[in-house]
Image (tube, coloured by chain):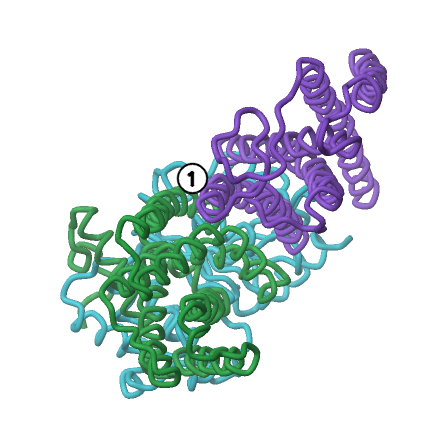
Amino acid sequence: MERRPKTLTVLSWLTSVVFIVALYLVLFWAPQEAIMGDVQRVFYFHVSAGWVGALAFLITAIVGGIYLARGEQRWDRAAMASVEIGVVFTFINIVTGSIWARPIWNTWWTWDPRLVTATIMELIYIAYIMLRQGIEDPDRRARFGAVYGIVGFISVPLTFLSIRIFRTIHPVVVGSTDPTAQGAFDMTANMRTAFFFSLFTFTLIYITLLWHRLRLQHKMEMIEERKLRALSA
Amino acid sequence: MIKVRHLVKTFGPKPVLRGLDFHVVQGEFVALLGPNGAGKTTFLRILATLSRPKMGEVIVAGHHLPSEAAAVRRRLGVVSHQPLLYGDLSAEQNLRFYSWMYGIGDLERRMDEVLHLVGLYPRRRDLVREFSRGMQQRLAIGRAILHGPDILLFDEPHTGLDQEAAAMLDGVLREIASAGRTVVMTSHDISRAADLADRVDILSKGVITASESTDSLDSLQLAELYRSVTRV
Amino acid sequence: MTDPIEQKIWLRADGSLKAHLRAIAAIVWKDLAAEFRSRELIGAMLVFAALVILIFNFALELDISTRETVTSGILWVTFAFAGTLGLNRSMAIEKDRGCLDGLLLAPVDRSAIFFGKAIGNLFFMLLVEAIILPMYSVLYNVNLFQPGLILVILLGSIGYTAVGTLLAAMAVQARTRDMLLPILLFPVLIPLLLAAVKASNGFLQGFEIVEIMPWVNVMIAYDVIFIAVAFMVFDFVVEE
């Protein structure tokens, strides 16, 4: 893994271009929502960021499981990289959710299932990082990370279910079943395009960032190894 | 009884054991010497099935580790740095607990026997946290032999003991090591090792750098050998 | 004196299930016996729980009507925090004198260690809850002795100790030991706590069973899922 592979370079460029297109679509091309106005545009990136957060968490749990089964270092590297990205994007999800909520519901925070679940997921991510930081032995660190990643991930759907039974004021966008949900809106065809395109864009961003992060981690480990070899020679 | 080939163990990127070879035949008493950080405790933990080797072959009593670790445990008695005893329980309760864990039959008789052997029978109802270091160590040995293992692993058992306690410990060790027991003991104390063991191996920088029978060398020669192979 | 190390005489040839159960029972017995001698843990948990309840009294202005609605919340917050004391202590005992190695050396399946510790933890937690309930009843003049509530407390405690034992086993091996357990545990516990509070409240206020059942189902699902998960991954947490 010495020179950056061509595929990654191409991918990075592609992602940047796609992102700019997505920005255009979301900010200009998509029609303005009738009731909420321009602030609704936050929604596209809000959901996409949330999607990446959840995806990252899922990946972390899966590669954690693979690490437990195989014991190969690279799976743990992937888990850590995924968590880092997940923390950032979940944070973006929470903040954009807040930005969206303010003008619509006149409050910075809405205690609805999705937002609360996202916050709890963020706390689990942070706990994951703190757990790892508190352990010296690299093998144990990886194992514990994997275990907590799995436990944490399984708890999230249960959390969502629990809170969903508890209360609902979050708009159910693609088909509303709860008539008391405020701020619901139907999407026109153009909106749908912008929406799915942003989902696609953010997924690309996730993959690109993950790849870059993995390479960086690998290089850091190689440096450590060489340092040790030089010191003990 | 114990066969180790090319054992490698790392702590993350840092190598601790670098292709270690080691063997012990049944009934042998081997003392393992080496400077701090050489990997003695790490090695002993691998033999005790408490840690997994990264690479290499480890065969104890005909079983490969770590895959057949469960089968070997019955036959191992381990005394480590720490006493592995519960301070809030009495000596007797500690032994009773381990008797249950190991599935020992005729508990009471066995416990009494062990308590007598390590000289703690009169103190059997006292809490372990009130014991001196020497007494805890003796009880730890009692715990280790409770289930009648034929392979014994001792990790620097004399640490923290005064002369009297250490001498008492030696007595117990000799008694236990008799009758065909296989023993591996790590130690800092060269003369004591020479006294107790059949053979002395020296572990330095992650490999065994010397191996001598104690019949052929006296402790002065051993000390000289030790210095020479552990010099940086 | 007979040779003290005659293997054949001293080890019974046991079926492994019996050995497994015996090991679990041994571990539970050990924790109970140790606690019986020192009585440190139960005392600490009780004092802590009592303090939390008193603090709630000053923090929340509890008039008669409000009291009824917040009771279940206060109870569960109390249990959740007092519980961490027990979990931490239970694992710290094993870590401190290297006793975990002693358990790992025994020829038993590692899951026996998990179940033994978890059942011990559950026992202590139930004991504390059994004392807190009457205490709260007396202090706030609320009748807490309803079978539905008892069931909820049981279900909640089981889930709590299952996940808690697993996470405590990890937390105790980290540098930041004491701080880490609540941080790891509480986010993961939320679905259970929420359901427990709602179900408790339902029983206390006499709601229809049909309204309470979803919550009880969530708790049962949580318990089953996490006992299974904890039991499966526990090996990776204790072994090297």
Q: Quadrant of the C terminus of chain A?
A: top right
Q: B56 or B193, which is in the foreground?
A: B56
Pick out the residue farthest to the front.
A35
Q: Position of residue A119 (x, y in %)?
A: 63, 47
* Residue at image coords 45%, 82%: C50
Position above or below: C4 against B212? below
Which residue is label 1 attached to?
B65
Chain drawn in green: C
- Characterize the local packing of mark 1: few (<14), some (14-19) or many (20 or more) Cα atoms within 10 angstroms: many
Chain B shade = cyan
Residue A174 is drawn in which quadrant? top right
Q: Position of residue C59 (x, y in %)?
A: 57, 78
Query: Taking the image as drawn, is residue B209 in sight?
Result: no
Query: Taking the image as drawn, is residue A134 in sight?
Result: yes
Q: B157 or C149, which is in the foreground?
A: C149
In the picture, measured across the screen, residue B16 lies left or right of residue B78, that is: right
Pointer 1 chain: B
Amino acid carrying mark 1 in the image: Leu
Q: B28 or A49, which is in the foreground?
A: A49
Residue B112 is drawn in which quadrant? bottom left
* Residue at image coords 25%, 73%: C145
Q: Position of residue C92 (x, y in %)?
A: 49, 67
* Residue at image coords 42%, 44%: B2
* Residue at image coords 71%, 39%: A84
Chain drawn in purple: A
SS state under label 1: strand
Please tell me how many numbered marks the rendered image carries: 1
Q: Position of residue A1 (x, y in %)?
A: 78, 21
